[in-house]
Amino acid sequence: MDNIAIKADKLTKRFGDFVAVDAITFDVKQGEIFGFVGANGAGKTTAMRILCGLSVPTSGTATVAGFDVYKQAEEIKKNIGYMSQKFSLYEDLTVMENITFYAGIYGLSDKEIKDRGAELLDRLGITAEAKTFVGSLPLGWKQKLAFSVAVIHRPKIVFLDEPTGGVDPVTRRQFWDLIYEASDRGITAFVTTHYMDEAEYCGRVSVMVDGRIDAFDTPANLKKQFSVNSMNEVFYQLARGAKRKAD
Amino acid sequence: MSAITLDNITKTYNKGTVLAVDKATFEVAEGETFGLIGPDGAGKTSIFRVLTTLLLAESGNATVAGFDVVKEYAKIRDCIGYMPGRFSLYQDLTVEENLNFFATIFNTSIKENYDLIKDIYVQIEPFKDRRAGKLSGGMKQKLALCCALIHKPRVLFLDEPTTGVDAVSRVEFWDMLKRLKHQGISILVSTPYMDEAALCDKIALIEGGKILSIASPADTVKKYPGKLFAVKSANMHKLLQDLRSYEGTYSCFTFGDAMHLSFKQDADADVSKLTAYLTAKGQTNLEIAEITAGIEDYFIRITEKLNG
């Protein structure tokens, strides 16, 4: 039990007669890098919102960091980190102000904010930029800073929603180095991405199609199962059969 | 005549302090699909806005369909289609109302050019009474493309049309572009996805406002200097560190389930020596093979040089 970070059993979410998430069952181990992929409209965002304590499921069960998604949504929020490419940092605040703001929201003491902030800046090699407005940083730096801020309260799990969209190929890979480092420190990473080469970097991957999880295994096993050479082909075979042509 | 020409176009922001586009020069031939490939912030959108006459460049010249972007901007606006990176249709109008609106301002009708959009429009026609704001991402993208095409433009500008779109929809989108190309429309398209570059007739790689390479996708990868190996082992995370500390290594990056390794000189590309080194490091299940570089390999190679 202790080494399971997320557990979902027949988790379902309906909007009227539309079944956005259709009885998904999976588990994520503590420290695992878990890839959560699927076509647009497959139900990824809805599932993720439930797991982040932002939406209540219609039926089924799920625990995140040991907390129940129905009854302990607030506890879940305190124990997770979240980063998306679309929204992460305040551009009009400086690097240090962003760190202070997020760390403050998560209830860190002034001393913790000072110590962890300095450590974070040092690890990213941007100590000299502490007073720079985030808006004027290169995109690659912003992404790395956003990730580091998302885990400043040392959560058990960090949700990364398309974290690498649009960044250059080298930065994209450096970003994955950060995910590996966090995983080595025992933080579970729950990652969505449209880059199928990144699905190869995950310990296990689930592929959602029309609200269901149609495949769930290590990248190597999935490739074997579908007799293909890349996760891109695995994804293409699964998602091509999707009935929801909404997206 | 060229569909698009750029001659030393430079664009700066914030009173010249931010150099967005640095002397960009390239040419798009009539009927060509030309890809502008680079990450966010590379300068792609600034180039699009200069060419679509929405921004003035600081210096340099540019033409679209033979017209000058400054002196003949009105003529350009009549004969181009532009799909900006951000969804910019009217959210409160329905699918059909949006399309009608764009047809009307260009003095045409949906009927007149229906042939051109038919393949794409039939996919969203079942939802023609739905407000555009209520459409899903993939459908918005298709509607935006229809609106950019409805007046039968000579040159089509697509700024990151597939960003945030899943792998299957991306394939479908590029199939649509292929059909438009057969209709003789010249296309300038930008993307951060290197795998899409291979689908263009010609590509320009751009980073930091500078055009770094212009060639066909096949010729682009031929420019990769030296040899490239793909290496796999049982412990991929450690493999990256081991390969980076190998004396003959120029650089090493993860590519899906393999590491791509380049060498300081061709003499360093020695499989038996590398195998011995990795085995001594405790690596098992080694697979080492020489491979042909892809566009992403080349992009990393030339931007590495730029950055340091």
Image (cartoon, coloured by chain):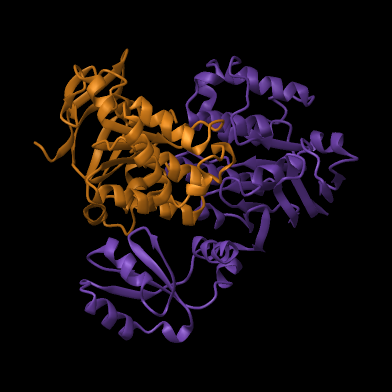
Chain colours: A orange, B purple
- Residue B109 in view here: no
Question: Count the marks: how many?
Answer: 0
Percent across and percent down for residue B256 are 36, 58
Q: Nearer the viewer, residue B16 or A100?
A: A100
Q: Which residue appears at 42% of the width and 55% of the height?
A: A173
Eyeballing the image, is A8 above or below B215? above
The residue nearer to you, when weighing A31 against B16, is B16
Residue at 20% x, 25% y is A11
Residue A148 image position (x, y, % from top left): 38, 42
In the image, residue B267 sits, relative to residue A51, either above or below, namely below
Q: Position of residue B282 (x, y in %)?
A: 20, 73
- Which residue occupies 91% across, 40% down? B71
Q: Quadrant of the C terminus of chain B?
A: bottom right
Question: Which quarter of the picture shows residue A58?
Answer: top left
Please state if A143 lies on the left or on the right of A4 as rendered.
right
* Residue found at the very far left of the displayed protein: A1
In the rendered view, tell whether residue A157 sits above or below residue A198. Answer: above
The relative height of residue B84 versus residue B7 in the rendered view (above or below) is: above
Give the image location of residue B2, x and y in percent. Answer: 80, 54
* Observer able to see residue A126: yes
Figure quadrant of residue A48: top left
Q: Nearer the viewer, residue A110 or B99?
A: A110
Residue displayed at 29% across by 18% down? A14
Question: Which quadrant holds residue A29?
Answer: top left
Q: In the current view of this chain or complex, which residue is farthest to the right? A: B71
Q: Residue furthest front?
A: A111
- The residue lying toward the viewer, choosing from B122 and B174, is B174
